[in-house]
Image: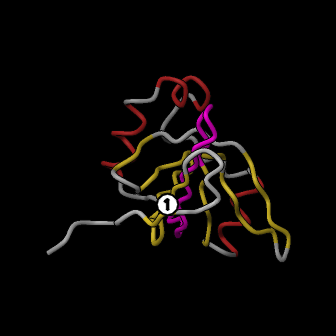
Amino acid sequence: MLASADGDQPRVRPISPVRTDEFTVYVASMRSSGKTDEIAANAKVELCYLTPDHDQVRITGIAEDVRDPAVRQQIWDSNPLLRAYLKSIDNPEFILYKVVPHRVRYMREWALEYHEAQIGYPD
């Protein structure tokens, strides 16, 4: 699930990431989607993953619009559903976000206590 803000109203919706690098998550969307205006107004988002056993991972971060042609092409080439739905990488509806994490927490099934995950690598 992806949470964004519509003014002072939180909005949560299911998403299907198109790529992950460690805790950085790439999400494809449609320019006409409600989340596009929400993210443009406030790029702070949170992703929440829930396993069938109720384990959770929450990634809090900033959604950035990915414009790098090489990254967009790699994701386009590796995602048949994206290609089938949008038909062309040049489709103006195709928008790609990179959620850059600044906090990652996880909780085991109903443990009621989150644990912080380390982001990045020690020097």
Task: Look at the numbered disc 1 and give the secondary structure of its residue.
Answer: strand
Viewed as shown, does residue 15 lie left or right of 78?
right
| Residue sitting at x 58%, y 49% | 56
Point out the residue furthest to the right here: 9
Label 1 neighbour load within 10 Å: few <14, some 14-19, many 20+: many
Q: Is residue 86 above or below residue 92?
A: above
| Residue sitting at x 34%, y 66% | 119
- Does the magenta portion include 26? no
| Residue sitting at x 38%, y 30% | 78
Rendering coords of residue 7 (x, y %)? 82, 75
The front one of 76 and 23 is 23
Viewed as shown, does residue 96 lie left or right of 45?
left
The front one of 53 and 100 is 53
Point out the residue furthest to the left here: 123
Rendering coords of residue 68 (x, y %)? 36, 57
The front one of 66 and 93 is 66
Which quarter of the rendered picture does the C terminus lie within? bottom left
Residue position for label 1: 99
Q: Is residue 35 above or below residue 52?
A: below
Rendering coords of residue 42 (x, y %)? 67, 75
Q: Main secondary structure of the magenta part?
A: strand
The front one of 43 and 1 is 1
- Does the magenta portion include 52? yes
Mark 1: which amino acid?
Val
**Residue 34 lies in quadrant:** bottom right
| Residue sitting at x 48%, y 63% | 115
Give the extent of the magenta segment. 49-65
Point out the residue furthest to the front here: 111
Specify the color scheme.
secondary structure
Rendering coords of residue 109 (x, y %)? 60, 44
The total number of labels drawn is: 1
